[in-house]
Image (cartoon, helix red, strand yellow):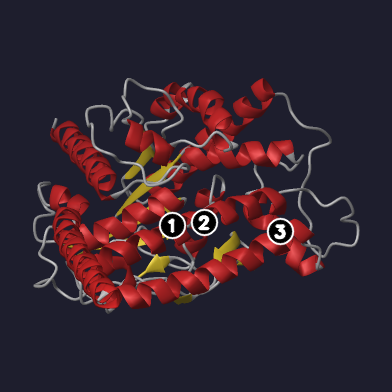
Amino acid sequence: MKDFKLINKGQEILKITLINLALLLVFLELGSLGWYFVKHKQFFYTREKAQDKSALGINLEGVRLNQSIVERFHPFFGFIQKPSADFRPGFKVNNYGFISPYDYPFKKFKKNQFVIGIFGGSVASDFSIFQIQNKILPQYLKQVPGLQDKEFIILSFATGGYKQPQQLLILNYFLALGQELDLVVNIDGFNEVALSNLNNKNQINLAMPSIQHISPLTSLANNSLSTKALQATIRIKENKTKINEGLESLQHCSLAACDALTSVYVQNLVNNYRRDVIAFEKERSKTQQDDEGSVMYINKNKSVLEDGAAFEQMAWNWAKSSIFMHKVLSASNVPYFHVLQPNQYYQTKRVFSDAEKRIAFNKETPYAKAVEIGYPALLGKFPNLQKNKINILNGVKVFDKTKDVVYVDSCCHYNKTGEVIFSNYVGSSIVEALRKDERKNKK
């Protein structure tokens, strides 16, 4: 009898456990359905199947799913991204290493085509991709008389890590190859101070390409990557494999709970990947002690410049490069617009939420101090740029009026909300300037 009672009691406990487990799974699924709807603005079971990994809701900004070091030396540009496929539909890393639907130089094949060149670093590259996908800048330009019926072709001449005078050199290179441009937008400022500051700390000439990007290529060429850098590379490679596997699983989830749990897992892997990339960047930016036998020659400074002198020189490099971009374009009557990009480390009246602070700020970053000192130096050159008749747009306050999260990382990049706000600012400012020029010409 006792055994029979124990069996009944055991069955009862098992039954209650299974019921509770079933209820837990139901509530988990219901909660996941709500989470999915809030995140994707569609119901999970009737969702459109994602055609590519970028549409799965995971922030893959800066994640290189195929290779760890994608840069390659270039004899004119310093470095480029290796030409290859891109995870975004309709894009590729083209024959010159730019993310674009087209190879360069691009030749117009319709009379009504209007070519816009975008120059700068990764923020400018993201801007060009966003315009091709969302056409915010073209919509503004269609308001300008004479441009209503134009087909706008946006060409990116921007790559992560580029800083002046790379934009100036790239512009002249492609003009020499016969590239037609009808309007040019140069979005920069952050790299010119943040990456140039790293050059200075490593006694590398400020006008040289970013030591953060050149150093690993030099180390690979010299077979001299440090042990810590190699260890970080291994972790990056392992994480990347797990990220790809997680994304593959995410594409085949049949339950919302599976999607939610896998998304959290993959996003955590992405965060670990980014931390390892930062660790790798720190190691690869260290100057090699013995570079006498190096096959690469990089101009150096005899000593580290004092901050005041260094940032003043950075600001002049930035301003003079922009002035010469304007001069060469104005010779062909091509409008040129220079935009100082917003960055979280330059303090304005913007109030960051706690959630955004966790995303946008990193106490370990070497960029914060460079922006705090460097941006005022850049702003100090605005009168010189205006004196040279440059349309200079000060974008540092464009996010001040929004409470939404706009930054996607602790460097400098924006999420979709940020891109929309920034695009509207750039588009409206350009249209206003073009209309102003038109009124002047009529007088």
Kindly give the residue lying farthest to the front in the view shown: 1
Decide if residue 188 is on the left or right side of residue 184.
right
Whether residue 13 can be seen here: yes
Kindly report which numbered mark, 3 or 2, lies closer to the viewer in this rendering: 2
Residue 125's image quarter?
bottom left
Residue labelled with disc 2: 272
Task: Give the amino acid at mark 1.
Answer: Asn
Query: Is 36 or 300 nearer to us in this picture?
Result: 36
**Secondary element at image label 1:** helix
**Secondary element at image label 2:** helix
Residue in view at x 59 percent, y 42 percent: 195
Residue 58 point in image, percent of width and height: 33, 61
**For marks 3 and 1 on the same chain, the one whose residue lies earlier in the sequence:** 3
Residue 149 point in image, percent of width and height: 9, 61
Q: Which mark is residue 198?
A: none
User: How far apart in space, not on screen, are marks 3 and 1 (Cα)?
Assistant: 22 Å
